[in-house]
Image: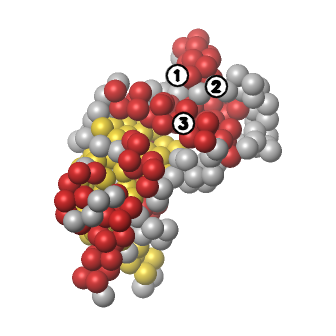
């Protein structure tokens, strides 16, 4: 479970995140929905300790990631926007390396790699160097790498960006399986279809602040709209009007 209260982060005079508060529960998929530059990635980077907040609090399973970074990282699986694969290593070697960093037993590690390769349909490229991989292949390796130590909480930054239809469907199925297993899943996106297909709770971020939050039905009621896309546009517009 993640609890964020009044989180703020500025870069010089630019207020990237200006008071974000929300909860992400175990056994749910929470979506951070917003236009490009809204503050989604900055928020996620503060959750996984890449950035330090200017103020506000973060609790991940009751721990502050900036007070107990090592313990929190053991509980987190992170798929960043850059993916960050080592291109001179094979997919298997990338995944194995992160498992070793987390101290996973050698025999258990190899078993988990094989299982993830099967689940994510990676057998055709698991032993190829990742240089030249397609976007879908890179995302699958990044997800397997993030899950190799079996974390409770998973953070994904626009995981389906640039993926083809079949890879997107496979990823959705995998994320829904994590939810059913009781994991806390948080993903950022600006793709409305992803929100409709996956998210139990939706947090709309506009200009670094929360514009609205709730499940899909609640957002439709708040906006008075008949579709999530129209609700998103309406709620973003209302928030920007209040901030201007």
The C terminus: image quadrant = bottom left
Q: Secondary structure at mark 3?
A: helix
Quarter of the image holding residue 154?
top left
Position of residue 144 measured from the top left corner of the image (x, y, whole percent):
57, 31
Q: Residue at x 44, y 34 (%)?
A: 175
Left or right of 194 on screen, residue 59: left
Real-space Cα separation, disc 1 to disc 2, in angstroms: 22 Å
Q: Nearer the observer, disc 1 or disc 3?
A: 3
Q: Earlier in the sequence, mark 1 or mark 3?
A: 1
Position of residue 68 measured from the top left corner of the image (x, y, whole percent):
34, 45
Q: How many marks?
A: 3
Disc number placed over residue 169 in the picture, else none: 3
Real-space Cα separation, disc 1 to disc 3, in angstroms: 30 Å
Q: Secondary structure at mark 2?
A: loop
Disc number placed over residue 104 in the picture, else none: 1
Disc number placed over residue 121 in the picture, else none: 2
Left or right of 45 on screen, residue 231: left
Q: Is residue 60 above or below residue 110?
A: below
Position of residue 103 measured from the top left corner of the image (x, y, whole percent):
52, 25
Position of residue 49 measured from the top left corner of the image (x, y, whole percent):
43, 53
Q: Earlier in the sequence, mark 1 or mark 2?
A: 1
Label 2 Cα neighbours within 10 Å, binned few <14 / some 14-19 / many ≥20: some
117, 4: nearer the viewer: 117
């Amino acid at each position: 479970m993640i609890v964020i209260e009044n989180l703020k982060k500025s870069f010089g005079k630019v207020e990237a995140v200006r008071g974000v508060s929300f909860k992400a529960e175990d056994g749910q998929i929470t979506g951070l929905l917003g236009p490009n530059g809204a503050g989604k990635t900055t928020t996620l980077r503060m959750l996984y300790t890449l950035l330090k907040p200017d103020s506000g609090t973060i609790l991940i399973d009751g721990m502050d990631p900036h007070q107990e970074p090592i313990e929190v990282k053991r509980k987190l699986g992170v798929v960043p926007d850059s993916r960050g694969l080592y291109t001179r290593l094979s997919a298997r070697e990338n995944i194995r390396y992160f498992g070793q960093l987390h101290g996973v037993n050698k025999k258990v590690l190899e078993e988990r790699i094989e299982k993830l390769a099967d689940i994510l349909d990676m057998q055709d490229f698991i032993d190829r160097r990742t240089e030249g991989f397609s976007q879908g292949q890179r995302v699958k390796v990044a997800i397997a790498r993030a899950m190799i130590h079996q974390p409770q909480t998973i953070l994904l930054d626009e995981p389906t960006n640039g993926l083809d239809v079949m890879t997107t469907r496979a990823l959705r199925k995998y994320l829904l399986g994590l939810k059913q297993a009781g994991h806390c899943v948080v993903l950022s996106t600006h793709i409305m279809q992803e929100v409709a297909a996956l998210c139990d709770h939706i947090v709309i971020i506009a200009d670094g602040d929360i514009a609205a939050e709730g499940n899909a039905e609640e957002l439709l009621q708040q906006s008075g709209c008949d579709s999530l896309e129209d609700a998103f546009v309406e709620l973003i517009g209302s928030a920007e009007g209040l901030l201007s």
